[in-house]
Image (spheres, grey):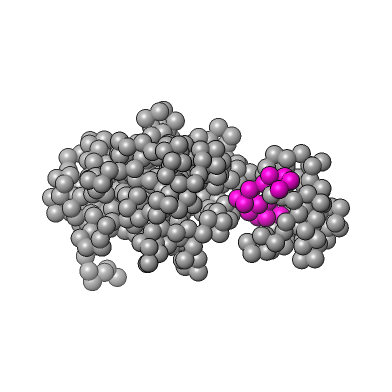
């Protein structure tokens, strides 16, 4: 029986066709923070692994960063803006709920009237966006979707709270997800995603203070135990084994979480020479922007190369998590 | 079921792996924070590994009560 409704022809899959990122020029070191609050360089390095981060100036908006990163990704894909038909901005730090970031970002890039929406899955947002975009493309709803993770966390921090102000930072990263016309060119694996709403209050913006609050120990325990199974599931869904992974790019939350998860993956067969993103050292935790930022930086320094099999895993407020395997364009 | 000596040696191995402290240093009277200089995040990693190894639950509230190595050994022995 044929469907009563006409549907587009489904394609073999999706591929990542371009990458781009941007960070504010303003570098804030641990020493700079030690002047403002009771903390010190050694303590920060030891607890979270960060040495410096980028913090946007007052007049540099989230949409400014999203537009720049998005433009770079479109150009990197060898496309012109009018070929993009969907724009997804993963963010949780817009200054207001209305208007959304995606429509104005698209306009700034010069993309005419795309489907444009924001997606809030906090630090997992980029992987949720890539998963959504890949299915849109595969299902025939979109040909080229631009996924941007963009955050200005500095607007939502209590700059006297040393448990959060030392961690979070600003930036944007983007990827273009395009149709894969044949099986060989498929470069985005199935997404595995989920949530833990019972822990929703573990990372939140407090209503009274408008500042981000995190129950560090609870989140650390959750991340060090729950992220590796998500990563392994993403590998399994893609029909691969841990030994196939060349590059591992987890959300840049805390270097100790990253190392703990990498260790668990290696215990399950991931290679010792698997390259693990450590972009947090100089970028801080930029929530939804951290994965594309890290990936773009690893490409620039040669640690992620064309054809590499790359494992992405995002996790954070919600609590939310998502992961997939991609192939570097 | 592991006896107290087995729990101590198993716990010492975990502490060595997580915090790089020689197993010989991990004795019952030692305080994790004051004597072994282990921070709160490492304590969580130790608790998570101890849960796997000994089949116990060590919630964060409980973890805060385990001041010394001996406290942890006793807790695991009672709850495994």
* Magenta stretch encompasses residue A282: no
- Screen quadrant of the N terminus of chain A: bottom left
Whole-percent x and y of residue A41? Answer: 51, 38
Work out which residue is located at the far top of the displayed protein and give it: A302
Whole-percent x and y of residue B53? Answer: 73, 54
Q: Is B40 situated above or below A308? A: below
Whole-percent x and y of residue A243? Answer: 56, 39
Residue A293 figure quarter? top left
Magenta-highlighted residues: B34-50
- Screen quadrant of the C terminus of chain A: top left
Residue drawn at x 20%, y 39% is A79
All told, the count of numbered labels is 0
Majority secondary structure of the magenta segment?
Answer: helix
Front residue of A184/B9: it is B9
The answer to whether any part of residue A17 appears in the image is no
| In this rendering, position of residue A92 left or right of residue A102 | right
Residue drawn at x 38%, y 38% is A28
Residue drawn at x 34%, y 45% is A170
Whole-percent x and y of residue B2? Answer: 83, 58
Residue drawn at x 79%, y 42% is B25
| In this rendering, position of residue A67 left or right of residue B68 | left
| In this rendering, position of residue A171 left or right of residue A280 | left
* Magenta stretch encompasses residue B40: yes
The answer to whether any part of residue B66 appears in the image is yes
Front residue of A253/A85: it is A253
């Amino acid at each position: 029986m044929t469907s009563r409704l006409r549907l587009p022809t489904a394609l073999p899959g999706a591929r990542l066709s371009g990458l781009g990122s941007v960070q504010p020029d303003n570098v804030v070191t641990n020493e700079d923070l030690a002047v403002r609050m009771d903390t010190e360089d050694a303590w920060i390095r030891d607890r979270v692994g960060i040495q410096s981060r980028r913090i946007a100036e007052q007049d540099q908006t989230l949409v400014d960063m999203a537009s720049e990163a998005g433009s770079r990704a479109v150009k990197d894909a060898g496309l012109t803006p009018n070929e993009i038909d969907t724009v997804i901005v993963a963010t949780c730090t817009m200054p207001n709920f209305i208007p959304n970031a995606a429509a104005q970002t698209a306009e700034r890039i010069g993309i005419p009237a795309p489907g444009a929406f924001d997606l809030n899955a906090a630090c997992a947002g980029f992987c949720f966006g890539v998963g959504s975009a890949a299915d849109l493309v595969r299902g025939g709803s979109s040909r080229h979707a631009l996924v941007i993770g963009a955050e200005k966390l500095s607007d939502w921090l209590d700059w006297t709270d040393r448990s959060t102000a030392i961690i979070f930072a600003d930036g944007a990263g983007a990827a273009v997800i395009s149709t894969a016309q044949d099986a060989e060119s498929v470069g985005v694996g199935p997404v595995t995603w989920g949530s833990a709403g019972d822990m929703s209050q573990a990372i939140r913006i407090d209503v009274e203070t408008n500042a981000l609050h995190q129950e560090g120990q609870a989140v650390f325990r959750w991340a060090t135990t729950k992220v590796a199974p998500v990563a392994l599931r993403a590998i399994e869904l893609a029909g691969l084994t841990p030994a196939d992974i060349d590059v591992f790019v987890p959300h840049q939350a805390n270097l100790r979480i990253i190392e703990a998860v990498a260790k668990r993956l290696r215990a399950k067969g991931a290679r010792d020479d698997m390259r693990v993103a450590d972009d947090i050292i100089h970028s801080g935790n930029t929530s939804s922007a951290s994965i594309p930022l890290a990936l773009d930086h690893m490409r620039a320094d040669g640690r992620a190369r064309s054809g590499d099999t790359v494992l992405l895993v995002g996790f954070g407020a919600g609590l939310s998590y998502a992961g997939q395997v991609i192939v570097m364009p | 079921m592991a006896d107290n000596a087995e729990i101590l040696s198993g716990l010492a191995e975990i502490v060595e792996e997580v915090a790089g402290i020689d197993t010989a240093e991990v004795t019952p009277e030692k305080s994790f924070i004051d004597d072994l200089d282990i921070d709160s995040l490492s304590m969580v990693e130790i608790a998570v590994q101890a849960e796997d190894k000994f089949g116990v639950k060590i919630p964060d509230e409980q973890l805060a009560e385990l001041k010394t190595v001996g406290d942890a050994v006793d807790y695991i022995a009672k709850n495994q």
